[in-house]
Amino acid sequence: MFSKKNRLITSIVIAMLIGLITGYFINRSIISEKVDYSKIVLIKSGNPEVIKKTEAALIKFSEKVFKEQKKTIASRFSILSDIFLRMIKMIIAPLVFAVLVLGVAKVGDFKSVGRIGLKTLIYFTSATLIALMLGLVLVNVFEPGKVMHLDLPDAKAETGVRSNAQDAKNFISHVIPDSIINAMATNDVLPIVVFALFFGVAAASIGDQGKAMVKACDSLAHIMFKITNYVMNFAPIGIFGAITAVVVMQGLDVLSGYAYLILCFFGGLFFFVFVVLWIIAVIFKIKFYKLLADIKEPILLAFSTASSESAMPKTIEALEKHGISNRIVSFVLPLGYSFNLDGSIMYMTFATVFIAQSYGMDIGMADQIKMMLILLVTSKGMAGVPRASLVVIAGMLGMFNIPGEGLLLLLAVDQILDMGRSATNVVGNAVASAVVARLEGEKF
């Protein structure tokens, strides 16, 4: 466990445990400072109605003060995770560009790129449909919205999440960059992928004149991987900050209140990974558990930071070490971050119907199928949007006349659920890369 190979994993696990303990004690110390206004005699012989209203107002004020106090303390710890995630983000754009240009140049021409691209997109679409259907099956079988009887938020409450009504025009505008510099500046992976595809094919097609640029991209990729190794030394500190901030804000009591929802969703994620993806791996003769062992570091990174993006550089390295060629990994993986986020996609149908159930609304099978087909399209290309899953879900709520403020029912545990989603996304994209490699006749 403490070997050089597993040092980062060990450090991350220890950082998570210390973060949980630190966050718990800070949260409990803040809660213990609360004043119990019910025990204060405000007016000994006054109007009971006035006393009751005054007490309620004081309690509400107290809750607001302590919420702000928790938010302030949590923000101090989250600075550590923000620094780590920002360092990861500074790597993403040049790394994606370099490895994809390199991969496409090695493939050679538009015909070969088109062949691999078609196989990749067929797999992504199939995996997305399975994930969407699994989300619907879970929420309909276990009915967490009906079982939990959560208090509904105020009808005028603000969620802080803007809905996304994505249509064909918006999707095309997002996919095709009007400025590659702007796409890189905003870390929008999908437009970078599109530009890199054209750039890689063009570099390969001009022969010797393009070799210098391909070699430069090879050098750039190696440099970015070296920077990744430097940045990863900060990972345990960033993860400690992220976990501590979440526990300070939410406490561990939220786990008991939402235990049924968390168990249902995480049970679905485990089923998807260890049954659905395992079956796919068996069909394509992929050593599933060896693959999991090789990507355990990026899985843990994604889980602890609740960010698939943070694990991307390490996932590329791990898959190449597993034996998948650079041309496949560098092509499939960047596309996967926009088209194949299995955990996030499963959450979209699960969460939308969960909110409807909480409001006592019955979404018929025809509407659920319609929802699934809409999400098949609208979920694509959302990786560059902060809190992407919630943005898409907010759009679905409006489309099916489900109260938008219902999103607040999920916000208390969304960070916890996002940890599971992000880890599943990493596994899903690793399996996708292995499947496409097998379809291309690679042996590993």
Image (spheres, helix red, strand yellow):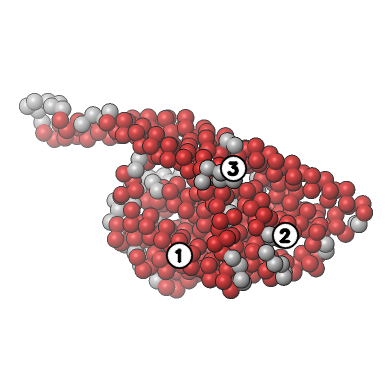
How many neighbours does mark 2 have within 10 angstroms: few (below 14), some (14-19), or many (20 or more)?
Answer: some
The residue positioned farthest toward the left in the image shown: 45
Name which quarter of the figure residue 117 lies in: bottom right
Q: Earlier in the sequence, mark 2 or mark 3?
A: 3
Please tell me whether mark 1 or mark 2 is closer to you in this view: 2
Q: Secondary structure at mark 3?
A: loop
Number of the label disc, if any, that sits on residue 271 = 1
Q: Secondary structure at mark 1?
A: helix
Could you tell me if residue 175 is visible in this image? no
* Residue 286 x %, y %: 61, 67
| Residue drawn at point x = 34 percent, y = 60 percent | 144
Up-down relation of residue 3 to residue 241 (above or below): below
| Residue drawn at point x = 57 percent, y = 50 percent | 298
| Residue drawn at point x = 35 percent, y = 65 percent | 142
Amino acid on which the number 2 mark rests in the picture: Ser
Amino acid on which the number 3 mark rests in the picture: Lys
Residue holding disc 2: 325
Q: Left or right: where does residue 352 sit relative to residue 206?
A: left
Could you tell me if residue 266 is visible in this image? yes
Name which quarter of the figure residue 57 lies in: top left
* Residue 70 x %, y %: 38, 32
Up-down relation of residue 109 to residue 235 (above or below): below
* Residue 120 x %, y %: 67, 66
Number of the label disc, if any, that sits on residue 4 = 3
The front one of 64 and 103 is 103
